[in-house]
Image (spheres, rainbow, N blue to C red):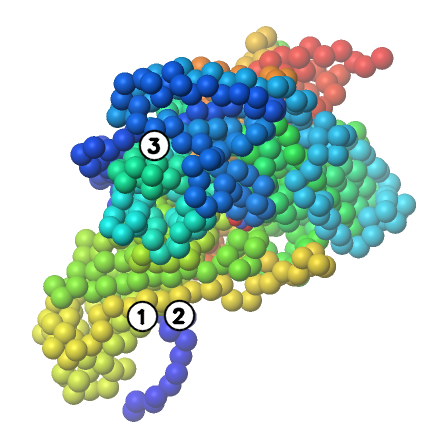
Amino acid sequence: MHKNKSYNILDAKLDAEYTALKKSIKNRDSYTHVRGESLYVDDVNIRQGTFHAVVFDSPKAHGKIKHIDYSKAEALEGVERILTYKDIPGKNQIGGIIPDEPLFAENEVHFCGMPIALIIAETEFIAREARRLITIDIEDLPVIITAKDAKEKGSFINEPRTFNLGDSEKAFENCEYIFEGETFSNGQEHLYIEAQGAYAEPLENGNIKITSSTQGPTAVQKTTALVLGIAMHKIEVDVTRLGGGFGGKEDQATPWAVMAALATYHLNQSVKLVLNRHDDLRMTGKRHPYESSYKIGLSKDLKILAYQVEFLQNSGAAADLSPAIAERTLFHATNSYYVPNVTTKVLSCKTNLPPNTAFRGFGGPQGMFVIESAIARAADSIGVSARTIQEANLLDENDTFSYGQVAKQVEAKNSWNSAKSLFEIESLDQEVEDFNKNNSVFKKGMAFMPICFGISFTNTPMNHARALVHIYLDGSVGISTAAVEMGQGVNTKIIQIAAQVFSIPLESIKIESTNTTRVANTSPSAASSTADLNGKATLKACNILLERLKKVASKYHKVNPDQVSLKDGFVYVDHEKSQVEWQHLISMAMIERVALTENAHYATPEIHFDKSKEKGHPFAYHVYGTSIITTTVDCMRGTYEFDSAKIVHDYGKSMSKGIDLGQVEGALIQGIGWMTMEEISYNEDGKLLSNALSTYKIPDLFSVPKHVETVPLETDGHVLAILKSKAVGEPPLMYGIGAYFAIQNAIKAFNPNYNMKFHAPMTPEKVLMGLYEKKPD
Ligand code: LUZ
Ligand code: MOS
């Protein structure tokens, strides 16, 4: 009997039927990557006559432009044109959240590396030669480098934000222990392998096509239209893939694309602008450095009763994404702990550094570092291990976050306890203790790092995506979404979804470039949400097409659509294989004039946030996990190695185990790098000193943990995660924070007089000073 029951197409096939695909699957891009065949902006086949552009940028961090002499540069043979703010037909404005950032400096410069002009020449070499011939006279203005200095001088991006839960002032009265302190975490360079770049081409009627290495094609389109003073439909933005983004191309891919388009607008010729590494390091913003002061209060039985923090975010010279990043710092200020009385405040401090920007974790890691520091400080003073305090305060089901969301499907204790038992914590402890007893020059330290990360853009309206699915008449499939592939494997995940719905081979499905004419008005690929948002839209589109195809098959077989299914490239009737193959079914659908294209929209349900109250339910769900990091410190040299990183991670029900493991391991090591060795350094004039890979060190094969073990936590996943496979891009970065505290513990084992410091990164120089620090008088 057939009943005409209605059901939610989106949820129709969530569970059992999809388990077949939840196996280890290779990133489909690996094949072209290893052969060097993957295409990046620098690989675009350029048109004959293409010009090449180089940016002329400010040599000073703050000042008034008195005079610029372009004459020698303009006279150089092969130089076509030099464009400045005077050549902008629309608005000289690229600010995404707050309109406070010009594309080109007008009368003042606000950071070293601030773009002033674009030199366009026959070759990049000539453009670079021309850049050297430009002379500029700048009258110095006072330079602000640190967030604290900015605060003292009242230099801010916007109004501060404060989250509050309970009454922290009053709660301190009931605390047995109260500690106050200051912390610092430095910035971090994205160091995507592919530097920023774009290629603009003139089309007919003044239309322009831009190939950009951006996480946010719509941001590029919108800003280009604004700067050129033309409609968005005249700008087409296309992205094949990025050689890494890490947040550095969420907002800051835009100016280079706009500049290339501006040159194309004036010259009616293709223009290529790809930054070299030095220019990229100097001109682009990084992870925000934070200076923070905290006050933490604990009960006798080590419950955290009250917590207050003031975060000073070093935003740089313009807002960029700083307000959103500051907000996420507040969302994650208590990490995976329940604290009943919390007051957190963040100030976005305006300095004369390049505008700092999105970086994997988006302010979350900076927030978590502070509470971990406060716990370590409390533990050290009380004379217990930090672990004891961490464990006593882990989040439980139905606990409330400071922003009002009630925690559901909480895996904080589950992942913590699983880590303890799976990795045999007693014997690990014993190992460290024995080692430290038997060795005087080398000391080991261990630390736990629990994580809790909210999934969704904190700005609710951004949580949507679309998918455009074509089934071609030979049965092959082409899919366009808003997802930008940047090495994270989202294209593979989307292929898996379609392959599963249609039950056809992965090879029958192609992911098209991300293009604003096929999928419009998109949010950037960011916030760990790309696979969830675009995957859900794809799932929806594919399921709608499937229903149509089932109808075609049912008509042919003279049965009800409910009796029809697709499996392994064949039509099945009542679970019996028929003679009708997928390609045949598509031909029948063509003859029946059935639409073989679907365009679906997905918007995350349930989420909301009220900024006037700073309360709501901003996240679809949270991702949890626990890492245990062990280090060995060489107490003669101050150098360290990481023995192991042992992780229990909440993937939900991972749909692509290989890809997800890659994300966890990559993020772990990026987090360790941020906390231990990556040291961004500006001098007092605002010049970047760590401006090359000789002076900016990132983890290499020798500095990653000798042993990395990641165990999936068996959980139900979450219905708002694509196929219950939870977002995995950013959360594991915060496992790396454990590396900082492991080193602290090792120093302490060597030098009991060491007064713990919370000033990241923990470079060998700092370790050495700590090892030989004397007892304060
Ligand atoms: N980008 C953004 C993000 O615009 N909003 C967010 O909440 C976010 N979160 C993480 C990373 N990028
Ligand atoms: Mo982001 S930090 O671009 O997800």
Residue 663 is drawn in which quadrant?
A: top left
- The residue at which mark 2 appears reads as 10
Q: Is residue 82 visible?
A: yes
Residue at the image point whose x is 24% and y is 86% from the top: 560
| Secondary element at tag 3 | strand
**Residue 273's disc number:** 3
**Residue depicted at x 75% and y 34%:** 154
Say whether marks 2 and 1 touch (CB < 8 Å): yes
The three-letter amino acid code for the residue at tag 1 is: Asn
Residue 27 visible (yes or no): no
Could you say where residue 406 lies in the image, as x and y percent from the top left? 65, 61
Residue 440 spot, x, y in % from top left? 62, 11
Q: Earlier in the sequence, mark 1 or mark 3?
A: 3
Amino acid type, mark 2:
Leu
User: Would you name the residue on which mark 1 appears?
Assistant: 543
- Relative side of 300 to 506, left or right: right
Residue 159 shown left or right of residue 9 in the figure = right
Label 2's element?
loop
Query: Disc 1 to disc 3, how far (Cα)?
Result: 41 Å
Q: Quadrant of residue 146?
A: top right
